[in-house]
Image: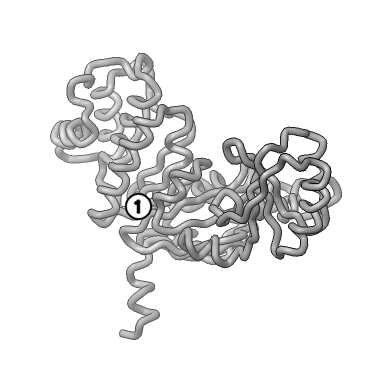
């Protein structure tokens, strides 16, 4: 068995040319995704970038208009029903019954999957996510963090080897987010593969690898260090600038890819130092109290710069 074949055997997601159109617009446009067993892959991008559509195609809920490949060894186009039964999919919006208790919801999901030892499966799911003491509480009375735990418990009840999580921590508090990610890393250590969409940079940093998508196309992929290195950004931190008009002018300056606030400083990014010098030197002359220093690019610098360069496939007159 050669090296390439061995790697393919360990790919839980391996799809190429994945495309979905609505009318003349491609909301997912000829993308390739490969994720190996036990890896956590962060799926990032602005709203409307095609993340949810991609996840729905990968789990068999939405038929691609083009593309081929496999999830869990099953053909994406011909075995969608089997993929749905073997994947754990957590939607953006809480999708369980709010007028049922935690236990009743999990029992209902276990029935849907036809689990033979339903009560045991529910008990195990309650224990794993720390839900035993609340098992008779109505789902509608739960806080965002506890609803999140219930939704994850429902995803895991049939012991899937692939989890597709669509912005699972939106609207929950920092403690609940941290607990959630601790559980995701435990699952990955047990061999579960996770593809998770998120807007939070601190969550992106907890992923083994990242895919950044905008307007239906993948703009960057790799580990955090690979993506930052390949972006080849030069970044300077500007402290003391509060003039909104000057900031807007800076964003429009030739060669400037992004200018975004990070705490009390403004990170200004470009591909070369000359562009930074030309944009910042006049600003410093007009505002002698400014403090400007070189700084390391971070993921957010890269992603803001990428989206600034991306072409909007829904812009007027832009046919996909």
Count numbered badges in the picture. Answer: 1
Q: Is residue 172 above or below residue 158?
A: above
Quarter of the picture holding the C terminus = bottom right
Write down the residue under mark 1: 162
Q: Nearer the viewer, residue 298 or 157?
A: 298
Q: Quadrant of residue 40?
A: bottom left
Residue situated furthest front in the rendering = 288
| Mark 1 Cα-neighbour bin, 10 Å: few <14, some 14–19, many ≥20 | many
- Taking the image as shown, residue 256 lies to the left or right of residue 262, namely right
Q: Is residue 82 visible?
A: no
Q: Is residue 307 above or below residue 275?
A: above
The percent position of residue 12, horizontal first and vertical second, equals 37, 61
Say which element carries label 1: strand
The percent position of residue 286, horizontal first and vertical second, equals 83, 43
Residue situated furthest right in the rendering = 317
Q: Is residue 83 visible?
A: yes
Q: Is residue 262 above or below residue 204?
A: above
The percent position of residue 91, horizontal first and vertical second, equals 45, 37
Quarter of the picture holding the N terminus = bottom left
- Taking the image as shown, residue 69 lies to the left or right of residue 24, namely left
| Image point (50%, 41%), residue name | 200
Q: Quadrant of residue 297?
A: bottom right
| Image point (81%, 58%), residue name | 278
| Image point (72%, 39%), residue name | 289
């Amino acid at each position: 068995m050669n090296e390439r074949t061995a790697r393919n055997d360990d790919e839980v997601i391996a799809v190429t040319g994945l495309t979905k159109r609505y009318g003349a617009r491609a909301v997912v446009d000829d993308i390739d995704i490969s994720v190996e067993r036990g890896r956590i892959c962060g799926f990032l991008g602005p709203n409307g970038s095609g993340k949810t559509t991609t996840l729905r195609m990968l789990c068999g809920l939405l038929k691609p208009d083009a593309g081929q490949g496999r999830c869990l060894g099953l053909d994406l186009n011909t075995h969608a029903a089997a993929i749905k039964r073997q994947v754990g999919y957590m939607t953006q919006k809480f999708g369980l019954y709010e007028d049922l208790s935690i236990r009743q919801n999990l029992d209902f999901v276990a029935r849907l999957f036809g689990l033979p030892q339903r009560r045991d499966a529910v008990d195990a799911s309650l224990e794993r996510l720390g839900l035993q003491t609340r098992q008779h509480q109505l789902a509608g009375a739960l806080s965002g963090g506890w609803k999140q735990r219930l939704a994850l418990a429902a995803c895991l009840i049939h012991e899937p080897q692939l989890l597709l999580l669509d912005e699972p921590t939106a609207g929950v508090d920092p403690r609940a987010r941290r607990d959630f990610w601790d559980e995701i890393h435990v699952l990955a250590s047990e061999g579960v593969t996770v593809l998770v969409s998120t807007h939070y940079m601190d969550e992106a940093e907890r992923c083994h690898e990242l895919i950044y998508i905008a307007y239906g196309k993948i703009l960057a992929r790799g580990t955090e260090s690979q993506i930052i290195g390949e972006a080849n950004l030069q970044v300077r931190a500007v402290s003391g600038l509060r003039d909104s008009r000057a900031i807007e002018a800076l964003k429009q300056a030739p060669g400037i890819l992004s200018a975004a606030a990070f705490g009390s400083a403004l990170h200004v990014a470009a591909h070369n130092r000359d562009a930074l010098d030309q944009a910042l030197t006049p600003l410093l002359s007009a505002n002698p109290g400014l403090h400007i220093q070189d700084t390391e690019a971070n993921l957010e610098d890269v992603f803001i710069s990428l989206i600034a360069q991306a072409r909007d496939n829904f812009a007027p007159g832009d046919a996909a």
